[in-house]
Amino acid sequence: MAVEIGQVAPDFTLMDGDRKEHTLSEYRGQTVVVAWYVLAFTGG
């Protein structure tokens, strides 16, 4: 599913490095930046 500029992002949940879940809708009204690193901390 592609999200176009200006569209509302679909709700999703991600787990942080401490294994705590964060759901996008919990941050409604705030600026949110999602960053990830492919293969980070995998040792390879």
Image (tube, helix red, strand yellow):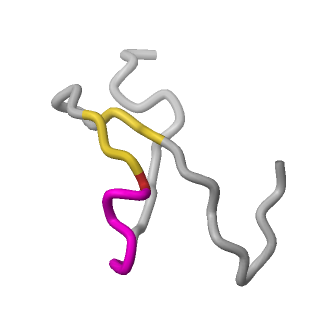
Query: On screen, 7 above or below 33?
Result: below
Which of the 4 image quadrants contains residue 33? Answer: bottom left
Depth check, front residue: 11 or 2: 11
In reply to whether residue 31 is colored magenta, the answer given is no
Q: Please name the residue shown 34% across and 33% down the image.
A: 15
Residue 31 falls left or right of residue 36: left
- Looking at the image, the residue that sits furthest to the left is 18
Residue 12 location (% of width, % of height): 52, 44
Q: Which of 39 and 3 is in front in this view?
A: 3
User: Which quadrant of the structure image shows residue 43?
Assistant: top left
Picture coordinates of residue 35 (x, y %)?
Answer: 44, 55
18 vs 33, left or right, is left
Total numbered labels: 0
What is the x, y in percent for residue 2?
Answer: 83, 56
Residue drawn at (64%, 71%), measured in percent from left and top? 8
Give the quadrant of residue 27: bottom left
41 w.r.t. 1: above or below = above
When the figure is inspected, residue 21 is found, relative to residue 43, above or below; the finding is below
Left/right placement of residue 13 relative to residue 18 reads right
Question: Over which residues does the magenta segment extend?
Answer: 25-30
- Front residue (pair 39, 14): 14
